[in-house]
């Protein structure tokens, strides 16, 4: 076996981290007659998201019944496979915040991996973290005390779960790494419903100081380009590049009116077409009226085709200095916020993770726990795509994501593998599959 196809240290380290975290979950069984520990319960749920197969546990139970062993034991360390209902009952009381350390471990492993976290560094060694909200459950019947609500036509009440997600992104590649989510839930003592903006402030207060060590720059849409959130970023030791729509920032537009702004133009060739990227900027404009207004730097990108037609225009605010030699990079980073829509939400909802599927709602925290495990599966997959040689070889052999996970789910339904190394070597066509037991 070649050096490039040996070892599963990254994947196995991440799985050990998750199992250790789950083992520390408080046991809420309250005298329930069960032989399962919380690590087995949590890893069983996680395995479904990691393999991307809703029937994975059912297939493993069949293997265990017929052969006394299964891939749940050899790949995920389960001593026994709990039932689906038992998994839901045991996880429901647990807080999703208990899983936060595992996201930190993913980032730590990327830092230790050659070229890992460097893939996300831009703007003089800063990392980019995109913030945005998304829903992951919606129903007119199923609900719990953590649901948000809204009224639809004909007076029908709709219940939904939403979360603020933070994701490592960077222009120039399609890799993204989900970070700790912050859930949008009714807050004790609050008269108004919780919202994405308030969740972002809580996220920054909880996690911002830790990511300040990575020189974090936060990206977001126009919703975030208001003084309270910009100040929250600065208070957490970060910087920001937020979309700034002219319609929602009339004061900034007043400052821009009648000024001869500095400008840089670049010609960019895409295939046979040529585009002109035009950048303009202005330093030190107040974000709002009042003596306490935060002063920010504004910049704009406009893209025109070779016929002179404008194909894209957007403007941003930032606390970072804007100059002729960095405005193009700042604009590229600001535009990278769309990766949380395209490479994160789109993949989670449509490419195997089934984010909006109701895997289990529960009465307390089950929906939030399960979606957090789903995010961790995505984070593990990306970390392995970046830093695990054997995983990357198997992925390259099988091509698109859907084909890789289809083969992964299919082969583990019938064959038992003694280790991840054996499984991935088989998927990479570097080793014959084991004989059926």
Image: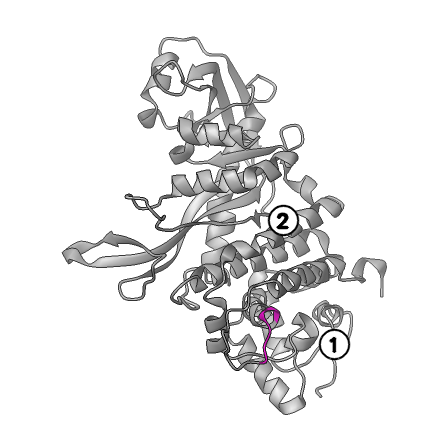
> Does 238 appear above or below 4?
above
- Residue, x 55% and y 77% (percent of image)? 57
Q: Position of residue 159 (x, y in %)?
A: 30, 58
Of pointers 1 and 2, the one earlier in the residue sequence:
2
Q: Is 423 or 35 nearer to us in this picture?
A: 35
Question: With respect to residue 199, does 426 lie above or below?
Answer: below
Residue stretch in magenta: 35-39
Provide the residue designation for mark 1: 418
Residue 396: x percent and y percent?
Answer: 68, 59
- In the rendered structure, does residue 2 fall within the stretch colored magenta? no
Q: CA distance from mark 1 to mark 2?
A: 29 Å
Q: Residues within 10 Å of mark 1 (few under 14, many from 20)?
A: some
Give the class, few, some or many, for how many residues have Cα within 10 Å of label 2's Cα (few <14, many ≥20): some
Can residue 433 be seen by looking at this rendering?
Answer: yes
Q: Which residue is mark 2?
A: 104
Residue at 48%, 18% (x, y): give it.
280
* Quadrant in which residue 424 is drawn: bottom right
Q: Is residue 273 visible?
A: no
Residue furthest toward the front? 31
Q: Is residue 31 above or below residue 187?
A: below
Q: Position of residue 302 (x, y in %)?
A: 45, 25
């Amino acid at each position: 076996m070649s050096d490039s196809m040996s070892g599963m240290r990254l994947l196995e380290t991440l799985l050990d981290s998750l199992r250790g975290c789950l083992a520390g979950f408080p046991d809420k069984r309250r005298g329930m007659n069960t032989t399962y520990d919380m690590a087995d319960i949590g890893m069983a749920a996680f395995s479904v998201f990691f393999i991307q197969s809703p029937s994975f546990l059912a297939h493993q139970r069949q293997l265990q019944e017929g052969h006394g062993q299964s891939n749940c034991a050899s790949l995920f360390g389960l001593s026994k496979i709990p039932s689906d209902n038992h998994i839901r009952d045991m996880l429901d009381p647990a807080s999703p915040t208990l899983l936060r350390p595992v996201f930190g471990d993913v980032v730590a492993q990327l830092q230790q991996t050659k070229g890992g976290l460097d893939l996300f560094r831009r703007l003089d060694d800063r990392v980019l973290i995109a913030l945005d909200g998304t829903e992951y459950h919606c129903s007119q019947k199923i609900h719990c005390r953590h649901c948000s609500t809204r009224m639809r036509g004909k007076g029908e009440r709709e219940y939904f779960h939403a979360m603020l997600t933070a994701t490592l992104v960077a222009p120039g590649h399609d890799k993204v790494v989900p970070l700790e989510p912050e859930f949008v839930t009714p807050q004790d003592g609050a008269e108004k419903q919780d919202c994405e903006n308030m969740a972002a402030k809580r996220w920054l207060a909880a996690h911002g100081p830790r990511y300040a060590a990575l020189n974090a720059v936060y990206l977001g849409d126009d919703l975030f380009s208001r003084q309270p959130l910009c100040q929250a970023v600065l208070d957490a030791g970060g910087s920001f590049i937020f979309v700034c729509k002219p319609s929602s920032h009339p004061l900034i537009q007043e400052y821009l009116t009648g000024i001869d702004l500095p400008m840089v133009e670049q010609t960019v060739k895409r295939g046979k077409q040529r585009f002109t990227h035009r950048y303009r900027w202005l330093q030190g404009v107040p974000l709002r009226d009042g003596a306490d207004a935060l002063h920010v730097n504004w910049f704009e990108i406009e893209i025109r085709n070779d016929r002179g037609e404008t194909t894209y225009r957007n403007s941003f605010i930032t606390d970072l200095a804007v100059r002729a030699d960095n405005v193009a990079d700042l604009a590229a980073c600001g535009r990278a916020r769309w990766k949380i829509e395209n490479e994160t939400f789109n993949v989670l909802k449509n490419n195997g993770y089934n984010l909006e599927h109701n895997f289990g709602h529960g009465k307390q925290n089950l929906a939030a726990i399960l979606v957090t495990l789903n995010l961790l599966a995505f984070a593990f997959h990306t970390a392995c795509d970046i830093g695990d040689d054997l995983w990357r070889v198997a992925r390259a052999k099988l091509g698109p994501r859907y084909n890789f996970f289809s083969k992964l789910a299919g082969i583990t339904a019938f064959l038992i593998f003694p280790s991840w190394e054996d499984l991935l070597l088989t998927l990479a066509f570097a080793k014959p599959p084991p004989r059926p037991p």
